Image: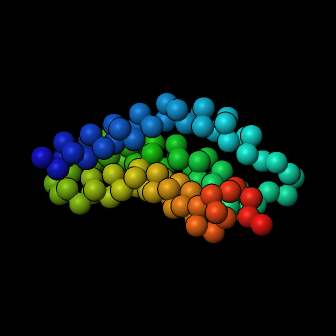
């Protein structure tokens, strides 16, 4: 049952790469000045790292799908899940520290 759950999670993470290019394009419009806010730059780096972590986790999952323990599969599934978690944490930090703005004042 856990192998099927991990496979489903990895497939959903791969589907999250479809709108990634559109999000990256839309993100270019958040820069209003040359010296941008550190939270804006951090969010951009998190968005840029999204496909790297998701694809690395998926490839590791596929290579080790016949592993004897589920711990190995969990490790690669969590690698793929790290990217959305990082993006969410940075977005929440912008909400908390900058009152929902991408420019802290």
Q: Where residue 84 sits in the image (x, y, percent)? A: 46, 51
| Residue 90 in sight from this viewpoint | no
Front residue (pair 87, 30) = 30
Outermost residue toward the front?
99
Is residue 84 something one can see in this rendering? yes
On screen, residue 70 versus residue 88, left or right, reads: left
Work out whether 64 lies above or below 16: below
Residue closest to the far left? 1
| Picture colour scheme | rainbow
Q: Residue 10, relative to residue 77: is it above or below?
A: above
Counting from the top left corner in percent of width and height, residue 47 is at 59, 48
Q: Nearer the viewer, residue 65 or 28?
A: 28
Residue 98 horizontal/vertical position (percent)? 67, 64
Q: Position of 23 compared to 104: left or right?
A: left
Residue 26: x and y in percent read: 67, 36
Q: Is residue 97 left or right of residue 71?
A: right
Which part of the image, by quadrant, shows the C terminus?
bottom right
Residue at image position (49%, 30%) is: 18
Name the foreground residue: 26 vs 82: 26
Please state which of residues 54 and 66 is positioned toward the viewer in this rendering.
54
Answer above or below: position of 49 versus 12: below
Number of marks in the rendered image: 0
Please tell me which residue is depicted at 86% across the width and 51% down the height of the picture: 33
Query: Measuring 26% from the left and 41% from the top, which residue is drawn there?
Result: 7
């Amino acid at each position: 049952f856990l192998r099927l759950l991990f496979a489903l999670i990895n497939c959903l993470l791969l589907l999250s790469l479809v709108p990634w290019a559109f999000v990256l394009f839309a993100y270019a419009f958040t820069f209003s000045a040359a010296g941008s806010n550190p939270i804006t730059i951090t969010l951009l780096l998190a968005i840029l790292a999204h496909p790297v972590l998701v694809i690395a986790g998926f490839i590791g999952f596929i290579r080790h799908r016949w592993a004897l323990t589920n711990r190995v599969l969990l490790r690669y599934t969590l690698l793929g899940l790290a990217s959305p978690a990082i993006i969410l944490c940075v977005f929440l930090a912008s909400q908390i520290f900058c009152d929902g703005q991408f420019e802290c004042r």
